[in-house]
Image (cartoon, helix red, strand yellow):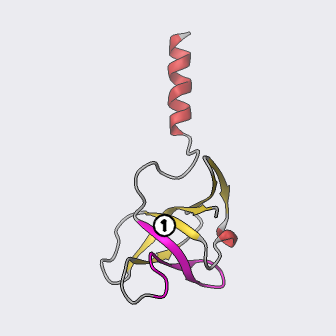
Amino acid sequence: MKPLLALCVLVLAACNLGPPSRAADATGYITTATETSTRILVEANPGQQTGDKAAVSIDTSTRIWSIKGTSATKTDAKSLAIGSKVRVWFDGPVATSYPVQGKAADIAIDAP
């Protein structure tokens, strides 16, 4: 019975039940988005010239999550609305320009 329990624990750990537990690479509000939601600009302090900003590319492998309390539900790029508060985890290298530029592995949309 113990090997079966260990297998179940491994399978559950491998399942992605929400965004990563580590700190996000970028946090802020969506201030611009392409019509097809394949690229968004995330700003920590919208309307200010300074502050953390990230130009985020999104493709079909990007996991997008709607977060309400402690519940995470998978959603799609259509949910990425201007003004939404988001957290972004990048996938692979990030250009260290201003704003930083990278492809998102995960995006969490935090409910107001």
The residue most toward the left is 96
Q: What amino acid does circle 1 point to?
A: Ala
- Looking at this view, is 48 or 65 the one in front? 48
- Looking at the rendering, the stretch of residues picked out in magenta corresponds to 26-47
Q: Is residue 76 left or right of residue 38?
A: right
Where residue 1 appears, as percent x and y from the top left, is 56, 9
Residue in the picture at 58% in, 77% down = 38
Query: Which residue in the protein does label 1 denote?
Result: 104
Q: Is residue 7 left or right of residue 112?
A: left
Residue in the picture at 55% in, 63% down = 62
Q: Is residue 1 left or right of residue 78?
A: left
User: Which quadrant would residue 78 be assigned to in this image?
Assistant: bottom right
Q: How many marks?
A: 1
In the rendered image, residue 36 lying in the magenta stretch gets the answer yes
Number of residues whose C-alpha sits closer than 10 Å to that of mark 1, classed few (under 14), some (14–19) or many (20 or more): many
Where residue 58 appears, as percent x and y from the top left, is 54, 72
Quarter of the image with the C terminus is: bottom right
